Amino acid sequence: LCRAVGADTYLAGTDSSYMDRDRFAAAGICVETQHFEHPAYGQEHGEFTPFLSALDILLMQGDEALGILRGGSTWSRLAPGPR
């Protein structure tokens, strides 16, 4: 699928242990996996309640929401590729 659309990188979720990384590497496709730690942000009522929804952070933080969510993610390269 990556080759069909001309992609050189595959972005995988946290649990990518099911993937055959050698096949991606042989095809010259870089595999990166996301590690997400839910960021805390200001909510209206009481203590912070994590894992509500994207709508919650959008309504509570407005224009800052995307930056806060991006701050909770890091990426690790699992298979070599052109990057």
Image (spheres, rainbow, N blue to C red):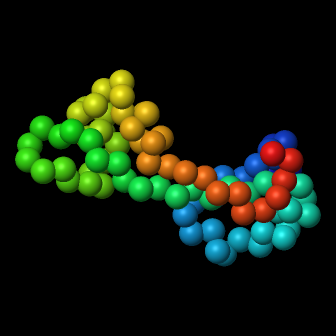
> For residue 60, what is the image quadrant?
top left
Q: Is residue 5 above or below residue 80?
A: above
Residue 5 in view here: yes
Q: Is residue 57 above or below residue 51?
A: above
Task: Identify which residue is drawn at 85% across, 68% down.
Answer: 23
In front here: 29 or 35?
Answer: 35
State the quadrant of the C terminus: top right
Question: In the image as oriented, which residue stretches furthest toward the left?
Answer: 46
- Would residue 11 be found to the left or right of residue 38 on screen? right
> For residue 31, what is the image quadrant?
bottom right
Task: Identify which residue is drawn at 39% across, 38% down.
Answer: 68
In front here: 4 or 19?
Answer: 19
Task: Identify which residue is drawn at 45% across, 42% down.
Answer: 71
Residue 13 percent across, percent down from the top left: 57, 60
Residue 24 percent across, percent down from the top left: 83, 62
Q: How many marks?
A: 0
Q: Is residue 24 above or below residue 69?
A: below
Question: In the image as oriented, which residue stretches furthest toward the bottom?
Answer: 18
State the quadrant of the N terminus: bottom right
Residue 53 percent across, percent down from the top left: 31, 47
